[in-house]
Image (cartoon, rainbow, N blue to C red):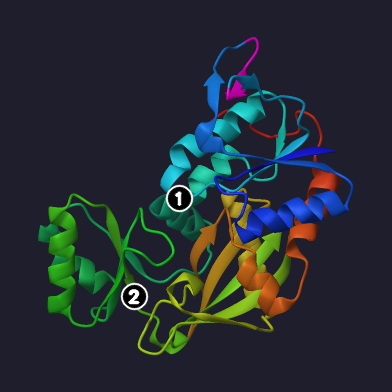
Amino acid sequence: MKIAILSTNPRLYSTRRLMEAGKERGHEMRVINHKRCYMNITSHRPEIHLNGVSIEGFDAIIPRIGASVSFYGAAVVRQFEMMGVYSVNESVAITRSRDKLRASQLLARKGIGLPVTGFANSPDDTQDLLKFVGGAPVVIKLLEGTQGIGVVLAETNKAAESVIEAFSGLKANFMVQEYIKEAGGSDIRCLVIGDKVVAAMKRQGKEGEFRSNLHRGGSASLIRITPEERSTAVRSAKVMGLNVAGVDLLRSNHGPVVMEVNSSPGLEGIETATKKDVAGTIIEFIEKNAKQGKTKTRGRG
């Protein structure tokens, strides 16, 4: 098969591992910088070009779209779909999961456990919003944030009001969530491929840090997850429409709650912690599922 990895940096661990895994299994692999692609959007013959040359002949793509270029990256994925190329994660699923508010609403509608979450447009609603989520301490998250950036723990109502006022003044969209104290600054990253959790790790924030992101100095270790956690992770990926997803869970007193569903999960932390060949499992999934024109949406939506 001829498989393209959409990535802006071929030296990134995840991109390199996918390249290696694909080549080991006999596939022709290529890294394409989706930010450098440009498109001819026509109904009879959609095209993608890079450096003056048409990109064609691919059987499948693996989108590794960074949060900062979600809009353009999803447009490139959609164009590949219109050309009949199989995408391991479809454009609609990527944009759905990247919108934190929309994702939370969709997960809640399907009965998946979430931290109590509030969203408002006016700072005049702050008092009632804080009551929604049980009062301080609360976590305030920018909807556009990623890797723990734009996530603030407000330990008092006064502090929460100040942060909300600041975010509102910047015309930023944010949501307010209950703080799951019993999680102790740790979360669980479940790597879902298809309808299975293929690897899971516990991420622990460094001392004094409530965010467990590895990019912020957190540590990763192997963990055994419960059947309920496994089911929650698989269902969450399915609700988003993602074939490959990193589902972040917290262990709360009322069961597992989902923090985020990531459409481009990093492989370094989880492969290192679990010693599992996650990249190879992604390639294997493509081998079993990629067919010309199999994309469900064919670029619609």
* Residue 274 visible in image: yes
Q: Say which amino acid is labelled 1.
A: Ala
Q: Kindly indicate the quadrant of the structure image that contains residue 166.
A: bottom left
Q: Contact (CB < 8 A) between labels 1 and 2?
A: no
Q: Dot 1 lies on which element?
A: helix
Q: Which residue is the extreme one toward the right?
A: 26
Q: Is residue 108 magenta?
A: no
Where residue 156 sits, quadrant-wise, is bottom left
Residue at (71% x, 67% y) in the render: 197
Dot 1 or dot 2: first in sequence order is 1
Residue at mark 2: 178
At which x and y percent is residue 30?
72, 40
The span from disc 1 to disc 2 (Cα, nearest Å) is: 24 Å
Q: Residues within 10 Å of mark 1 (few under 14, many from 20)?
A: some
Image coordinates of residue 235 in percent, x first then y, are: 63, 61
Q: Does 210 appear above or below 107?
A: below
Residue drawn at x 63%, y 77% as measured from the top left: 201
Q: Is 277 placed above or below 12 here?
A: below
- For the point 35% across and 64% down, the residue is 149
Amino acid type at circle 2 is Glu
Percent x, y of residue 174: 28, 58
Give the residues in magenta: 44-51
| Residue 116 in the figure: left or right of residue 26 | left
Residue 240 on image: x %, y %: 57, 51
* Nearest to the observer: residue 196 or residue 32: 32
Q: Which mark is residue 43?
A: none
Work out whether 2 lies above or below 102. above
Which of these two is toward me, 231 or 12?
12
Left or right of residue 270, residue 280 in this image:
right
**Residue at mark 1:** 67
Residue drawn 37% across and 83% down? Answer: 209
